[in-house]
Amino acid sequence: MPDSFPLPPRFSSVDEYLSALAEFYLRPFVQSLAGEMHIINFFLTSPDLFEDTLPEEWLEFFDQAELDDVLDYLIYFSKSPSLQPPDSLSKFLSTVQSLSIDRKLVDEKGHSKPVPPLHSSALSVGMSPKKIHECQYLSSLISDVCSKVGTPHVIDLGSGKGYLSRTLAHEYNCSVIAVETVESRTKGAARLDSLYDRKGGKKKKARAEMGTGSLIHIEKFVDGGDLTDIVEQAGLSGHKMVLAGLHTCGNLSHHALKSLVDTQEIHAVAVVGCCYNLMTEKDSEEDDVGYPMSRKLQSCSIPLPSTARMLACQAPATWTRETRESFFTRHFYRALLQLIFRDRGLLGQIQNIGSLRKQWYSSFHTYCKGACQRAVGAYDAELDASSENPFDISEEVSTEYHDRLLSKKRRLCVLWTLMACTVGPLTEALIHLDRYYFLKENGASEVQVSVIFDQVMSARNLVVVGIKGFP
Ligand SMILES: C[S@@+](CC[C@H](N)C(=O)[O-])C[C@H]1O[C@@H](n2cnc3c(N)ncnc32)[C@H](O)[C@@H]1O
């Protein structure tokens, strides 16, 4: 198997792709979209982030054209006949497109990849259609990697409720060690294992024997690439193993890739990452966990600030008009509340708010109530009894802020979409180039990055496979 990376059509080598991507990504305008702005601070600057960042002719176009047409243009590059985007914007978006990985799930001839079967319906118990899709495609690929390496032994890192592990054990007869840090998930996985047995799944052997078709669960927080203790606990020292991971979030992907180097028994890795916002950036030579992992990307000095990593987690192509409206409302409310906090001198004192349950977004006033319960943190109203609690936001105040800035919501929608559709895919490509080069620099004889899921079913759909180059 030759090394491969899903290169955009105009490139003939990974090095050539990286240098073009790096040159574009490091341009000051792209850097300002990628890192210098945080959407929660949208209303804090004057002029606002939108006016402050974008060229004049784009501002005019974005302010005047029909909003849904503009968003469709940014997301799908589809242009309604009446839409007249400025040439500079069309050119910018074309360049982004030409540098983006094609995320369609197709074979070498461009045909849709057939769905690998799941012979036992008992396996899909508890799985959403998304999870079934992921387990079908990824377990089929992992079983191919096992055959290539010549082992039935797989470690499923960050196994969650064990859907991939169960599929590998019972559909492909692999012997699987599922490793997960959260106790409730390991327990949930064990319950699903029993349910699978009760439904008679175990009696059906779909395929010829590969291994024993066994599955054990180990509860452990993994913090590096040395998994020797897990291998020993499973009694498999000296056996060849494959390290698999379905949506290994943040740095867990890096630990998985490093296991090829740091754990003697690991002979191949096959991981699909996610949650790049949880990934750290290397802050020193000694830090061998964060991005960039590879010497190649280190030599390019391309920073990936938190905004860029968060944008890489978006999947605009899968947004519908309803879902995108709900994202925008969430961002709009958070940015408005940030302005209230600023006006009340509270910035620097607030706790992280994160995402609230759906019912808290029914109006801005309801959102203020829910968000302030989280933001209030260590503020003690009794200590400051002389004045009003600044986290009490009356309906009159919230309505005044909301109504005054509502007309600017469209600008926030456009800016967020522009950032997600441009910086997002380019950042995800850089992260995967880093993983590709890391494996190549560290003794893998075969490295493949490819599309493994239909992006509409599962947005984080790039798998990284590396096979050790020595026995
Ligand atoms: C996005 S979930 C994917 C779960 C499962 N693979 C699936 O696709 O259904 C990532 C899982 O990795 C686990 N995890 C994250 N960091 C971990 C670590 N350092 N060690 C072990 N498990 C970890 C999380 O608890 C979570 O269950």
Image (cartoon, grey):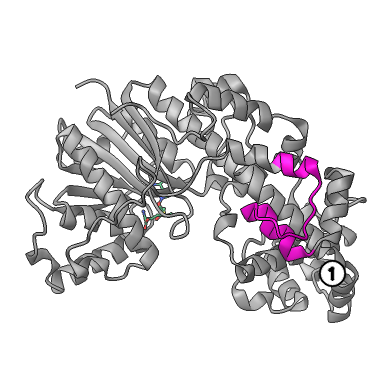
Rendered location of residue 319, percent (x, y): 58, 62
Is 49 within the magenta? no
SS at mark 1?
helix
Q: Residue at x 86, y 51 (%)?
A: 59
Q: Which quadrant, please, contains the C terminus?
A: top left
Q: Is residue 184 left or right of residue 370?
A: left
Instruction: Write down the residue under mark 1.
Output: 406
Hey, which residue is sitting farthest front in the picture? 81
Q: Is residue 305 visible in the rendered structure shown here?
A: no
Q: In this view, does 125 lie to the left or right of 426?
A: left
Above or below, 269 against 439 in this view is below
Above or below, 63 against 269 in this view is below
Magenta-colored span: 66-92
Tag 1: amino acid: Leu
Rendered location of residue 142, percent (x, y): 26, 44
Rendered location of residue 294, percent (x, y): 48, 25
Above or below, 128 against 284 in this view is below
